[in-house]
């Protein structure tokens, strides 16, 4: 994966989000070595988290085990110099249960992401992740979510955990 310097930061941001959908590992190439990512408190990462590139890579690996078929639907995106703000609806299919959601159910989050770019790389990422309730779809009926659940690992990313 090559980051093209003749791309706008807006175009880079779109390509960056697509890289999560393809799961080809290229998403880490968009980050500067000294990147800092701040995830503000949400349903999965209750205390929030601040991560460096190593922690972000570990979180990506845990996320790949927990979900599949990730999609990032951009609702709006604004570029101003080195700053890009993007509003996204994220969906993914669970590989393991989460709350009342079963493996195979789709979870949804509404994201506000704020990226700072320097020399074609992300140096700062701030995420405001608003997850929809972890409730079973109305058509799914009652489910037992007690056998396996998603918890967060040291990097604050979802990981599967048996009971």
Image (tube, rainbow, N blue to C red):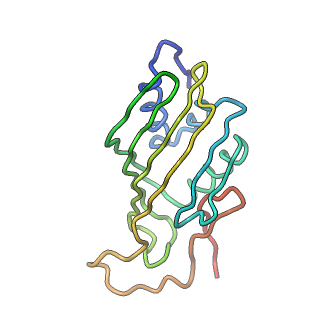
Residue 17, compared with residue 152, is above or below; it is above
Q: Residue placed farthest to the top in the image?
A: 6
Q: Residue, x 57% and y 40% (percent of image)?
A: 125
Q: Residue, x 48% and y 43% (percent of image)?
A: 113
Position of 133 with respect to 57 (left or right) is left
- Figure quadrant of residue 37: top right
Q: Residue, x 45% and y 70% (percent of image)?
A: 103
Residue 124, compared with residue 95, is above or below; it is above
Q: Residue placed farthest to the left in the image?
A: 139
- Along the viewing direction, whichever of 32 and 39 lies nearer the viewer: 39
Position of 126 with respect to 11 (left or right) is right
Quarter of the picture containing the N terminus is: top right
- Along the viewing direction, whichever of 26 and 91 lies nearer the viewer: 91
- Figure quadrant of residue 40: bottom right
- Figure quadrant of residue 25: top right
Q: x and y percent of residue 39 in the render?
A: 59, 52
Residue 24, compared with residue 70, is above or below; it is above
Q: x and y percent of residue 139 in the render?
A: 26, 78
Position of 88 with respect to 55 (left or right) is left
Residue 27, compared with residue 103, is above or below; it is above
Q: Residue, x 40% and y 54% (percent of image)?
A: 110
């Amino acid at each position: 994966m090559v980051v093209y310097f003749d791309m706008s930061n807006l175009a880079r941001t779109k390509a960056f989000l697509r890289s999560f959908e393809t799961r080809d590992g290229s998403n880490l190439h968009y980050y500067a070595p000294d990147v800092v990512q701040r995830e503000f408190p949400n349903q999965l990462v209750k205390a929030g988290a601040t991560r460096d590139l190593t922690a972000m890579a570990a979180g990506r690996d845990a996320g790949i085990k927990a979900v599949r078929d990730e999609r990032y639907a951009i609702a709006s995106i604004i570029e101003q110099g080195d700053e890009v703000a993007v509003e996204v609806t994220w969906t993914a299919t669970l590989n393991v249960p989460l709350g009342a959601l079963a493996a195979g159910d789709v979870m949804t989050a509404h994201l506000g992401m704020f990226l700072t770019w320097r020399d074609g790389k992300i140096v700062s990422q701030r995420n405001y992740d608003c997850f929809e309730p972890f409730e079973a779809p109305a058509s799914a009926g009652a489910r037992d979510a007690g056998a396996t659940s998603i918890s967060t690992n040291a990097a604050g990313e979802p990981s599967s955990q048996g009971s």
